[in-house]
Amino acid sequence: MKPFPPTLREKRRYIVFELISEKSLGKKEVKEGIWKNILENIGIIGAAETGFLFIDFDEKTQKGILRCKNIDLNKIKASLCMLSEINLNKACVHIKAVTGSIKKACELLGG
């Protein structure tokens, strides 16, 4: 089976974010907290349509990478802005950059 040509593929965007919270959180906690928030705000079907994926999170710097479709970028950004707590800890997501390649996102993450 042949892969789709580039003109038919859906474009992806990578969101580099920084988590600001009362205490340092682990990767699993952050992943579950962000997923829960996205599901609350745009629903199961909406989350499935956005192609949302939690890529990476660095526990030392509290920075991470998310992926979504180009058309649904604003839905994800709005949902991340509404995040107020993770595991009963006050938390806030600061979006550092949005890029079109995973390579550039990893550079911005610091590794």
Image: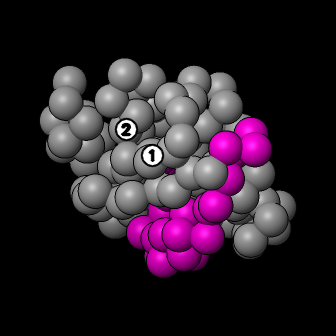
| Left or right of 106 in this view: 49 | right
| Quarter occupied by the N terminus | top right
Which range is magenta?
65-89
Q: Does 78 sit above or below residue 37? A: below
Residue placed under numbered mark 2 in the picture:
63
CB atoms of marks 2 and 1 within 8 Å = yes
Tell me which corner region of the image, top left, top right, bottom left or bottom right, holds residue 61: top left
Residue 111 spot, x, y in % from top left = 20, 24
**Camera-side residue of 94 and 52:** 94
Q: Does 3 sit above or below residue 58? A: below
**Disc 2, SS:** strand
Residue placed under numbered mark 1 in the picture:
19
Residue 17 spot, x, y in % from top left = 38, 50
Label 2 and label 1: CA atoms lie apart by 6 Å
**Disc 1, SS:** strand
Q: Name the amino acid type tagged 2.
A: Lys
